[in-house]
Image (cartoon, rainbow, N blue to C red):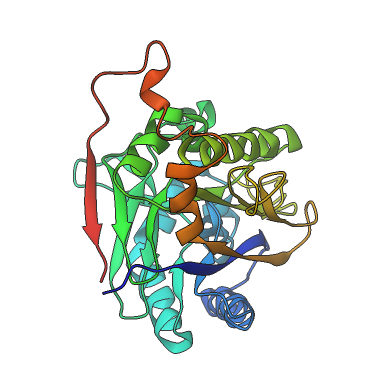
Amino acid sequence: MAAPTSLKIASSQYPIGQPKTLVEWEQKIALWVKTGAATGAELLVFPEYAAIEQAACFGPEVYGDLKITLTKVAELATSRIELHAALAKEYGVHILAGSGPVLKPDGRFVNAAQLITPAGKVGEQEKLVMTPFERDWGISAGAPVRVFETAIATFGIAICYDSEFPLLVRAMAEAGADVVLVPSCTERRSGYHRVRTGSLSRALENGIATVQSPTVGDAPWSPAVDFNAGAAGIYVPSEQDISEDGVLACGTLDQAEWVTATIDIARLRRVRETGEMRNSQDWNLQPGAPAAHVAVERVSLI
């Protein structure tokens, strides 16, 4: 199979609502996928903790309690993946489903996002570094670091806070990721800008593209996703003939919308070898560069 040379991505600024039933929630997701696919994008990216919206369907005794929310939304993980798989097949797109809690065999909850192909193959990345809120909530750090080889590109997934840790994304890039997806959920604009800064920095360091997708809007019914601020962004290194400022696209802050851009993957690969600067190649020249690299599991979704 020939290596992909370009990729059109649609990144969602997804609004957290208060659906009354699972059917209403499913209809909302289906409409978002339909409008995202209509942009001509080959990959649709949904944000971190978008799945928590499902808790609203079960009333305040569920959505008002963080622990019960985790349990109920985790119970829906299989059906949630099946819905996105059916939509991926219907519209012929790859989808990064909004992340949510997954219950592990040892009783721990992790925060996981699934990359789903039109053929129904599923790759899952667990969040690796927990925020203080997640620790208090009862979410555990997941493993391992993975990259996902697909027919359209090789992807890494750095869920929100993970994008702020250079060695994690570096490991994905070294394992072949051309694009790292960054689903995010931040209640303040300061949090949004931290993840945005991380995404821009990881693109620069590694000569790759990064794609941020945030939750937006207020959902006072939920103690987990009550306030949501951010804008979707598609980032690359600041290089001549790619982007002067490293921003291929950026949405309107806090608005519900799709943000799209086409990534020239072939040109990014050339930049890593012949660009104005060679950050990716020169990584190991920095004093203190680790001698041992993070182990990465490579997953084929072809």
> Which residue is drawn at the image coordinates 60% and 46% (left, top)?
185
The answer to whether residue 198 is above or below residue 16 is above
The quarter in which the N terminus is drawn is bottom left
Residue 137, position as x, y percentages in the image: 47, 34
Residue 129, position as x, y percentages in the image: 41, 31
Residue 295, position as x, y percentages in the image: 22, 35
Is 193 placed left or right of 128 in the picture? right
> Which residue is drawn at the image coordinates 31% and 51% (left, top)?
147
Is 9 placed left or right of 126 in the picture? right
Disc tally is 0
The single residue placed furthest to the left in the displayed view is 105
Residue 4, position as x, y percentages in the image: 39, 69
The answer to whether residue 175 is above or below residue 37 is above
Name the quadrant containing residue 124.
bottom left
Near-viewer residue (30 or 232): 232
The quarter in which the C terminus is drawn is bottom left
The single residue placed furthest to the top in the displayed view is 287
The answer to whether residue 238 is above or below residue 258 is above
User: Is residue 76 visible in this depiction of the protein?
Assistant: no
The single residue placed furthest to the bottom in the displayed view is 90
Near-viewer residue (100 or 172): 172
> Which residue is drawn at the image coordinates 49% and 52% (left, top)?
268
Name the quadrant containing residue 94.
bottom left
User: Is residue 42 visible in this depiction of the protein?
Assistant: yes
Near-viewer residue (104 or 300): 300
